[in-house]
Image: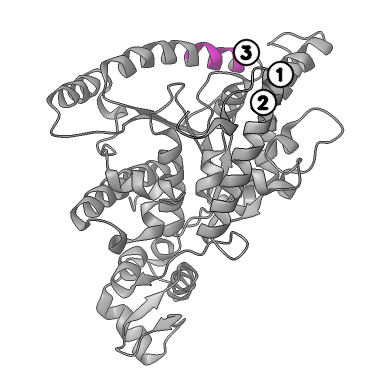
Amino acid sequence: MNGRPDVWFDETVPVDVQTAADAALLSGQLSGIWQRLFSPAGRRRLRTFSSGEAARLIGVSDGYLRQLSLSGDGPQPSNISQTGRRGYTLDDINALRVHLAAQGGAKARYYLPHRNARAGEHLQVLAVTNFKSGSGKTTTATHLAQYLALHGYRVLAIDLDPQASMSALLGHQADADPNANASIYSAIRYDEEQVPFGSVIHKTHFPGIDLSPSSLELQEFEHATPRNLAMRHADMESAAGERSFGRIQTAIAMVGDDYDVVVLDCPPQLGFLTLSALYAATGVIVPVNPQMLDVASMSQFLYMISDLMSVARKAGGGPNFSFLRYLITQYEPTDGVQTQIAAFLRAQFGERVLTAPTVKSAAISEAALVRQTLYELGRDNFQRNAYDRAMESLTTVGAEIEGLIKAAWGRTDR
């Protein structure tokens, strides 16, 4: 209809053939859009930051940063306009962090917050999980990874959702990758095609974040794991069970020395991928929308996650979390019902609910339309009040989780 009979569903064509053709058509169109948005070759670059933004990220005054620039002391900004405005890339900012930390003193670790493994600061592995779609799980995981990278941490993002939304936000287009064995699945599969985890970790356009992307083949893990258990004639309490649940943990251990924080974007289901993520996690963030149906489903989610963790524990020790927190997402403070539900959650769980919610924002949604985030696009691309409100929310949430990470390390500078 509407003058487009060529795209009507053809009843003479088998449904599997028709849907495969539709998938190929859509993939090709999306690939073209991707190339146009991020030319050449789909490459993306993170924007530059003003001197004020750079100073806030480093933790110094704008005047001090200007003084460093004028005196030629340390790394200089990549961009200086004819009017003298200084623009800093994130690489510039990180170089300044290293320069300031090298001067020693009490603030050295503040400038360069990398974990100190010798002092017992263990790798933080944060699983962002909820089996309810639309809870803001991927948005939370991606913004958290970017917040931490902006503040000087070395971050590994692992996309465990076969839909690969986090991968897309971090610049990886699964449909355009000719290597079918290039996702996280390649490092945790059970057959002879398994590869070292390091070979499926990619640099991103966002300095400080490496990515192990997802793809549809990751769904095979949900089928391969029970087959592997069955072939070994083993139950959940055996060494075979531990090997199955601990595959993500084992993969992370291979590269852990290179990172401070790992952020896991879990799939919206409670299967073997989620179980393996929880087995590897040192902290868990559960995003929840302040809607009655979401809160009701969250109850079932917690029962199920408790059962899964019990199974994992019997399989070989199980998870050992430094913290588990609930994050209220898509929050509209002017909505009376949402305000009541948020208060209800805080009354039930107390400090386990993060103080700061993530507000519902058109600015966040608009950024996602071009597969980017607010940290990438900057203030000039949006209505300023909306941008400032959303950014304040994201930054406050990130800072609160950063504080939990520092507390797990035993740091007092939080």
Magenta highlight range: 306-312
The amino acid type found where label 1 is placed reads: Pro
Residue 327 magenta = no
The amino acid type found where label 3 is placed reads: Lys
Q: Quadrant of residue 63?
A: bottom left
Q: Is residue 52 above or below residue 262?
A: below
Residue 199 or 281: which is nearer the viewer? 199
User: Which residue is disc 1 drawn over?
Assistant: 14
Q: Quadrant of residue 277?
A: top right
Separation of residues labelled 2 and 3 (CA atoms)? 46 Å
x then y, percent, for residue 256: 63, 46
x then y, percent, for residue 119: 53, 51
- Image mark count: 3
Point out the tag, 2 or 3, that comes first from the N-terminus. Answer: 2
The local crowd at label 3, few if under 14, some if 14 to 19, many if 20 or more residues have their Cα within 10 Å, is: some
- Image point 71% across, 46% down: which residue? 200
